[in-house]
Image: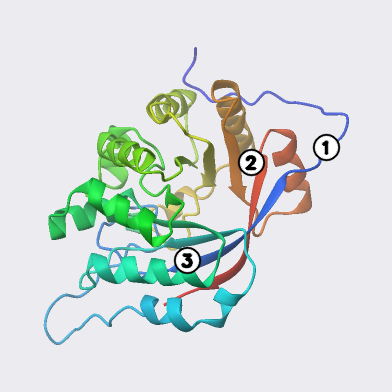
């Protein structure tokens, strides 16, 4: 096997219609994060010194009063950077409020945030995940699983959790009843070896049911010079996943994609299309 990612052209007679479109509400907790992941546009330095106060988050107020939460969605994603001051209980309350106001599936926080609160508040991981489930989350977000290869992580996001830590948190999450999901970031030049190593890691999640493909969007980040992956790299990545994880749903966000690209994605095996219906920013 070569390291190079090879695209195998396919010529379907007709588009496989009928991918499942999921209408998403995204709620951003904070657009600041000190983790400094090079591919992330939330990775902004947040001043901590007196005289440069960080404004308090508005998530709790949003969760209690925002009218968008009265509308219908298939999925609500609560995601964002890492806060300095708000405690775990703040996020737990906000998630509970969101769930009480809207019955949609709720993907809340990620292993990165869970590990952060585990360290800061010294609470066992299982307890945090049980509380997340109790608050109404149906799954953890896939954050932290962009590419579960430690040399890549060391280069791109060295402060963030390791592949084993990500896996360990998701294995506990599975046990407490949170659905298992992962992501894969397609960056320019990604190799088949890297994709297979990533797949090898997420195979350890017994109930893995969905993998979200995320083409690198580097605008405004440290990696802007790399640009975006070629469409063929995205399609070839999907082919490798379909071949090696045939039972797993391949999902992708289709905001800003043309109809032609959407057709190609369907033909190559993306069966869940996520369309953002609303975004609530801090
Ligand atoms: S931990 Fe997540 S939010 Fe923070 S910089 Fe990294 S990718 Fe962005």
Quadrant where the C terminus sits is bottom left
Q: Residue 231, which numbered label?
A: 2
Q: Secondary structure at mark 3?
A: helix
- Please, is residue 66 above or below residue 124 in the view? below
Image position, residue 36 (x, y; %): 28, 57
Within 10 Å of disc 2 (Cα), the crowding (few <14, some 14-19, many 20+) is some
From where the camera sits, is residue 25 visible? Answer: yes
Element class at badge 2? helix
- Find the distance from the CA under tag 3 to the CA under tag 2: 37 Å
| Relative height, residue 180 to residue 54 (above, below) | above
Quarter of the render that holds ligand 1: bottom left
Q: x%, y% of residue 173?
A: 35, 43
Residue 160 in sight here: no
Tell which circle, 3 or 2, labels the residue nearer the N-terminal end. 3
Q: Which residue is mark 3?
A: 99
Image quadrant assignment for residue 205: top left
Q: Which residue is mark 1?
A: 15
Give the numbered dot on residue 30.
none
Lower position in the chain sequence, tag 1 or tag 3: 1
Question: Decide: marks 1, 2 in contact (CB < 8 A)?
Answer: no
Task: Classify 10 Å Cα crowding around label 3: few (below 14), some (14-19), many (20 and above).
Answer: many
Q: Nearer the viewer, residue 36 or 189?
A: 36
| Disc 1 secondary structure class | loop
Q: Is residue 51 above or below residue 118?
A: below
- Residue at 34% x, 53% y is 38
């Amino acid at each position: 096997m070569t390291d190079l990612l090879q695209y195998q052209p396919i010529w379907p007679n007709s588009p496989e219609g009928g991918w499942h479109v999921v209408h998403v509400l995204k709620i951003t907790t904070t657009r600041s994060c000190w983790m400094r992941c090079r591919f992330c546009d939330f990775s902004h330095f947040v001043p901590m010194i007196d005289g440069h106060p960080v404004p308090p988050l508005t998530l709790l107020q949003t969760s209690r009063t925002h009218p968008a939460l009265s509308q219908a969605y298939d999925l609500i994603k609560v995601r964002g950077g890492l806060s300095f001051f708000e405690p775990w209980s703040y996020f737990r309350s906000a998630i509970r409020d969101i769930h009480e106001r809207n019955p949609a599936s709720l993907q809340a926080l990620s292993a990165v945030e869970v590990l952060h609160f585990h360290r800061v508040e010294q609470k066992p991981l299982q307890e945090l995940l049980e509380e997340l489930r109790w608050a109404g989350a149906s799954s953890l977000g896939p954050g932290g699983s962009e590419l579960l290869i430690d040399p890549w992580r060391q280069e791109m996001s060295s402060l963030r959790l390791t592949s084993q830590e990500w896996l360990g948190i998701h294995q506990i999450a599975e046990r407490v009843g949170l659905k298992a999901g992962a992501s894969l970031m397609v960056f320019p030049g990604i190799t088949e070896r890297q994709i297979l190593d990533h797949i090898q890691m997420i195979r350890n999640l017994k109930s893995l049911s969905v993998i979200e493909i995320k083409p690198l969007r580097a605008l405004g980040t440290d990696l802007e010079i790399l640009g975006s992956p070629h469409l063929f790299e995205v399609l070839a990545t999907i082919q490798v996943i379909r071949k090696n994880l045939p039972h797993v749903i391949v999902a992708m966000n289709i905001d800003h994609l043309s109809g032609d690209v959407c057709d190609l994605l369907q033909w190559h095996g993306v069966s869940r299309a996520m369309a953002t219906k609303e975004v609530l920013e801090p």
